[in-house]
Image: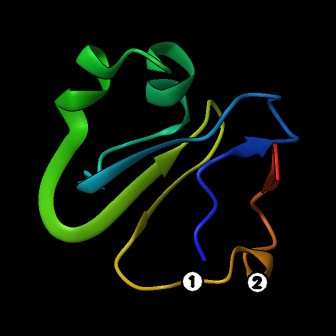
Amino acid sequence: RACDQLRCTACDFRVSLFNDYVWDQSCDYLFFRNNMPELSKLRAKMIKKKGARAYACQCSWRSIHELTDLQTEQQLRWVCGKH
C-alpha cells in the first residue's frame, strides 16, 4: 500500500508525489530547495513516464518504477504523516 501523506523528518516538509512522472537526471538538492512545492517550477525537470511516480520534499527525491519499501532507503527520512 502506498502512503500519500509522507512527511520528511529531515526538512519537515510534506513529500509531494506526481503520478506518471520521473525526475530528470540533472536534478539536485538546490533545485528542490528553491522550487518546492511550486509545480510550475518543478515541471522543468519532470519527464512523463507511464506507470512511474516521482516523489520529492525539499531535501530528497526519488523516481519509483515499481513497488518499493522506503524503509530500505536509509538516506530517506520519510514517514507517514497522518495514518
- Direction right: furthest residue: 9
Q: CA distance from mark 2 to mark 1?
A: 8 Å
Query: Is residue 81 positioned above or below 70 on the image?
Result: above
Q: Quadrant of residue 44?
A: top left
From the viewer's perspective, is 60 left or right of 49? right
Disc 1 residue type (three-letter): Thr
The numbered dot on residue 50 is none
Query: Is residue 55 positioned above or below 1 on the image?
Result: above
Number of marks drawn? 2
Q: Position of residue 64 (x, y in %)?
A: 41, 71
Q: Residues within 10 Å of mark 1 (few under 14, many from 20)?
A: few
Q: Quadrant of residue 66?
A: bottom left
Q: Identify the residue shown where x is 37% and y is 43%.
A: 27
From the viewer's perspective, is 40 left or right of 80? left
Q: Identify the residue shown where x is 72% and y is 28%.
A: 13
Q: Nearer the viewer, residue 37 or 44?
A: 37
**Contact, mark 2 vs mark 1 (Cβ under 8 Å):** yes
Q: Identify the residue shown where x is 38% and y is 54%.
A: 54
Disc 2 residue type (three-letter): Thr
The secondary element bearing badge 2 is classed as: helix
Q: Residue at label 1? A: 68
Q: Identify the residue shown where x is 14% and y is 64%.
A: 49
Q: Quadrant of the N terminus?
A: bottom right
Q: Position of residue 46 (x, y in %)?
A: 22, 43
The numbered dot on residue 72 is 2
Q: Position of residue 42 (x, y in %)?
A: 31, 27
The secondary element bearing badge 1 is classed as: loop
Q: Which scheme is used to colour this image of the protein?
A: rainbow
Q: Nearer the viewer, residue 81 or 58?
A: 81
